[in-house]
């Protein structure tokens, strides 16, 4: 990131710090919560329901903010979302399903150890103002590396604490993670309150009683947004069958793995996911954004299908790790691609929709996946996920391979 990533270091530094802390929290909670909920008597379908509600609530919030984000203000949105995180954290001490549903709807509950809420959409649009062209892909690659590495550290933290506790869950561990989760939300409130105004897009001055409350996208922008949103929903639907929380529950039920072992596994998957994103810039420069998105994603999905077919925990984990060597090369290229095919004023709308609908897609699956994992043929979620993601790859390539990128250098 030498030289080329110097602009607005104060903005980028705060965004990176906030994301790193947020992903550590998500990575830890995605493992601890399902195990603790199981110990409290919640069934796999009930856990799947909570995950579905959490993702659907996050998606709804992002979609509602799509046209209003730059009117309300990016800093204000991030501040309010972090405040809700802090306020709802104490409710996680409850084991009552209704209380947990409330947290899932308005809090920041991550089923897969990755982004929920409006955070990523706002940060993605803000970074697009700072970087352009190939540098934008590099910025997203490093931003994602930091995110995945932090998620991995969250999983590792759980593994270490579980190992100290003899590989078993404990009330002390659970309560300690909850306190840390709330503290990270509070730090985010402070960081976002100190963001400078340069993260905002200057709005055109409109006078009169009929000045619009939200910007209106053009027909061509809406067409791009809706088409990509539909495709990303399909991809996310596949991902929803294998969210990290349910994978942790599956490995625990299938092979009897404990918290220490699960923490090590998801430390590895998230670390490899982050490292894989670093290869995206070089591949995109040589083969193009779209080709990199599609042709690194396809083999990772084929490996996903193989995971439940492995007869031992060691082989299943090995195939899962191999999958994550390739699985996230499409993420920084996808983020750069969506920002490059629309202009600067359309990016908050594009980011809100394309990130929000992914939560809808993911939300539709955990409830069904939780039920399927309880069946003897527990490998079905992996097979369904792989098939849906392969269809997404081929359809995306077929539709967009001839569409030019018009705004790669816009800041």
Image (cartoon, rainbow, N blue to C red):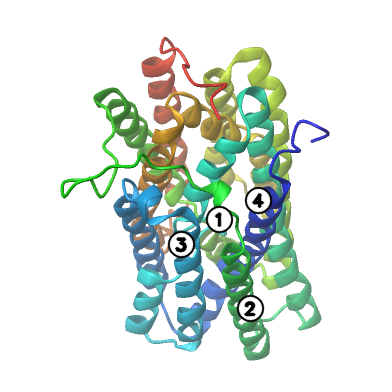
Query: In percent of the image, x 67 and y 57: which residue is there?
Result: 14
Query: Looking at the image, do the residues carrying marks 2 and 3 touch, with CB atoms under 8 Å apart?
Result: no
Residue 119: x and y in percent read 50, 56
Residue marked by disc 1? 114
Mark before the other along the chain sequence, 2 or 4: 4
Query: Looking at the image, do the residues carrying marks 1 and 2 touch, with CB atoms under 8 Å apart?
Result: no
Please identify the residue farthest to the left as the structure is shown. Answer: 209
Residue marked by disc 2? 183
Q: Tell whether 146 sits left or right of 344.
A: right
Label 1, secondary structure: give it.
Answer: loop
- Label 4 and label 3: CA atoms lie apart by 15 Å
Taking depth in this image into account, of 225 and 102 the one nearest to the observer is 225
Residue 26: x and y in percent read 59, 64
Label 2, secondary structure: give it.
Answer: helix
Label 4, secondary structure: give it.
Answer: helix
Q: Please tell me in which quadrant of the rendered image residue 374 appears.
A: bottom left
Residue 43: x and y in percent read 40, 75
User: Mark 2 packing: few (<14 Cα in 10 Å), some, or many (20+)?
Assistant: some
Q: Tell whether 260 sits left or right of 246.
A: right
The answer to whether residue 123 is seen in the rendering is yes
Mark before the other along the chain sequence, 1 or 2: 1
- Which mark lies nearer to you, 1 or 4? 4
User: Mark 3 packing: few (<14 Cα in 10 Å), some, or many (20+)?
Assistant: some
Please identify the residue farthest to the top as the structure is shown. Answer: 402
Query: Looking at the image, do the residues carrying marks 3 and 1 touch, with CB atoms under 8 Å apart?
Result: no
Residue marked by disc 4? 11
User: Mark 1 packing: few (<14 Cα in 10 Å), some, or many (20+)?
Assistant: many
- Label 1 and label 4: CA atoms lie apart by 22 Å
- Which mark lies nearer to you, 3 or 1? 3
Residue marked by disc 3? 76
- Which mark lies nearer to you, 2 or 4? 4
């Amino acid at each position: 990131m030498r030289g080329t990533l110097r602009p607005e270091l104060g903005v980028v530094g705060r965004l990176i710090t906030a994301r790193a802390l947020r992903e550590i929290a998500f990575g830890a909670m995605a493992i601890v919560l399902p195990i603790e909920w199981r110990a409290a008597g919640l069934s796999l379908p009930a856990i799947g329901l909570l995950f579905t509600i959490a993702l659907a609530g996050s998606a709804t919030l992002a979609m509602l903010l799509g046209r209003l984000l730059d009117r309300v203000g990016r800093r204000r949105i991030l501040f309010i979302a972090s405040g809700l995180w802090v306020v709802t954290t104490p409710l996680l001490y409850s084991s009552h399903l209704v209380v947990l549903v409330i947290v899932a709807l308005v809090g920041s509950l991550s089923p897969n150890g990755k982004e929920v809420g409006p955070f990523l959409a706002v940060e993605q649009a803000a970074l697009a103002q700072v970087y352009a062209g190939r540098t934008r892909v590099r910025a997203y690659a490093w931003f994602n590396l930091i995110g995945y590495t932090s998620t991995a550290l969250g999983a590792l933290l759980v593994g270490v604490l579980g190992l100290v506790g003899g590989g078993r869950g404990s009330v002390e561990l659970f309560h300690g993670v909850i306190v840390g989760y709330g503290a990270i939300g509070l730090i985010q409130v402070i960081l976002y309150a100190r963001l400078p105004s340069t993260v905002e897009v200057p709005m055109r001055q409109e006078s009169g009683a009929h000045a619009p409350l939200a910007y209106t996208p053009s027909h061509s922008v809406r067409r791009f947004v809706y088409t990509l949103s539909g495709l990303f929903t399909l991809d996310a639907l596949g991902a929803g069958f294998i969210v990290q929380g349910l994978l942790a529950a599956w490995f625990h039920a299938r092979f009897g793995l404990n918290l220490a072992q699960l923490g090590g596994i998801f430390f590895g998957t998230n670390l490899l996911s982050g490292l894989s994103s670093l290869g995206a810039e070089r591949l995109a420069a040589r083969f193009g954004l779209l080709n990199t998105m599609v042709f690194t994603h396809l083999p990772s999905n084929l490996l996903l299908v193989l995971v439940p077919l492995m007869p031992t925990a060691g082989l299943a984990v090995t195939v899962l790790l191999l999958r994550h060597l390739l699985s996230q090369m499409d993420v920084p290229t996808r983020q750069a691609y969506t920002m490059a095919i629309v202009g600067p004023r359309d990016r908050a709308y594009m980011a809100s929709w394309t990130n929000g609908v992914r939560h809808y897609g993911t939300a539709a699956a955990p409830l069904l996946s939780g039920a399927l994992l309880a069946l003897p043929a527990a490998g079905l979620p992996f097979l369904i996920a792989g098939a849906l993601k392969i269809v997404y790859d081929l359809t995306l390539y077929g539709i967009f391979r001839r569409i030019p990128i018009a705004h790669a250098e816009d800041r």
